[in-house]
Amino acid sequence: MVLNYIWIGFLIIAFVVALLRLIFAGDTEIFNNIMTAIFGSAKTGFEISLGLTGVLSLWLGLMRIGEKAGLIQRFARFAAPVFNKLFPGVPPGHPASGTIFMNFSANLLGLDNAATPIGLKAIQQLQELNPKKDTASDAMIMFLNINAAGLTLIPITVMMYRAQLGAANPSDVFLPILLSTSASILTAIITVCIIQKINLLQKELLLFFGGMALFIGGLSFLFKNLSAEQVSTYSTLIANMLLFTIICGFIIAGMRKKINVYETFIDGAKQGIGTAIRIIPYLVAILVAIGVFSASGAMGFLIDGIRWAVASVGLDTSFVEALPTIIMKPLSGSGSRGMMIHAMETYGADSFIGRLSCVAQGTTDTILYIVAVYYGSIAVKNTRHTIPSALIAELAGAITAITMSYIFFR
């Protein structure tokens, strides 16, 4: 229902803004730009789905090996103390807990190619437990909100773009991003727990949050004493080594269990094609709406309005030029990435705007993309409070990103 309103709202706003630009500014090219955006976005949606097919087949095949070898169940038992509290609707020891744990681990390390296929497997397992197949369950909402909060310990991609665009110290955004994304994920969990009436004062959750704070603090101290080259080298090495270890570990575990590893892999990989096909309509629909919204110039009107509102109350408007990245982030990952690069090219990689755009880009994930892909793969239409609670976390992350950028870079 929420997606329906968002989709229609984007299209209506885009049409009204385009019509106003035609009438008052004489912009005769505006509707040509919108039509180009519509067809381009539809093509992009298909290409993204097509690109996911190979990665989905690879990881769903490996996941099937892991299930038969018993590794997923071991992950589930390891995560049980915390996950039983955050996901009370998932039976203890259920394979979904292990898959969710692997998805979160891949996200933490910035392994997008592994995180999305594993996440799609997790949402399918949660759907098996869902009594109302067209409505998101509490467990699904918690899972997607944590994903949308986008906790990534080491923002390798952001630092890579900063290095390419000439930043003196590409890793200087590491600590602000870590603090901002931590605020986002904490807000996501607390918000969903409040809505779902989950007691946040349970011992397991308090220990989890405390351990997370200590880990983030230790990681911050470690990386603050490393050079930019060392941060990039060590983070990439650790992530890739861990990923390859997981792949080899699954295969070796399957061999020890004396299962037919090849046939098991093929059996799981076949699901990748079907999953990729199922998400195409959902992805095309949301990308077209976002493309039309951007092409109409509605984003520019929104930014100008915010700048006027901030200036009218006497506050510093320096951060406003980074708002396109912040506002685009929940809508489109590639769009926000483009805005970040544009900000660095326009103002400089080491400017306040350039750094703030990078911090905002690394703070959260793209909620509408995640909802379209994950819920689309299992045909869930009623998303309940998924998007509102995720947007609260996005807002907390954005506010923290702006605050941290003022503290570190002004």
Image: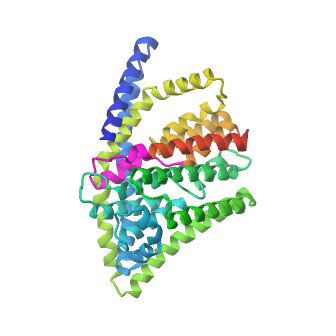
Asked which quadrant contains residue 33, the reply is top left
Left or right, 359 with reference to 222? left
Residues in magenta?
364-389
Counting from the top left corner in percent of width and height, residue 260 is at 33, 83
Question: Can I make out residue 61 in this image?
Answer: no
Residue 378 highlighted magenta (yes or no): yes
Left or right, 321 with reference to 409? left
Looking at the image, residue 131 lies above or below residue 357: below
Seen at 60% across and 26% down, the residue is: 310
Q: Which of 227 and 356 is in front in this view?
A: 356
Q: Which of 375 and 93 is in front in this view?
A: 93
Residue 210 highlighted magenta (yes or no): no
Counting from the top left corner in percent of width and height, residue 18 is at 40, 21
Left or right, 256 with reference to 231? left
Counting from the top left corner in percent of width and height, residue 91 is at 34, 70
Q: In which quarter of the image is the N terminus?
A: top left
Q: Which of 28 and 74 is in front in this view?
A: 74
Left or right, 46 with reference to 232? left
Counting from the top left corner in percent of width and height, residue 319 is at 63, 33
Asked which quadrant contains residue 116, the reply is bottom left
Tell how many labels.
0
Question: Can I make out residue 17 in this image?
Answer: yes
Seen at 73% across and 38% down, the residue is: 410
Looking at the image, residue 367 lies above or below residue 88: above
Seen at 38% across and 28% down, the residue is: 34
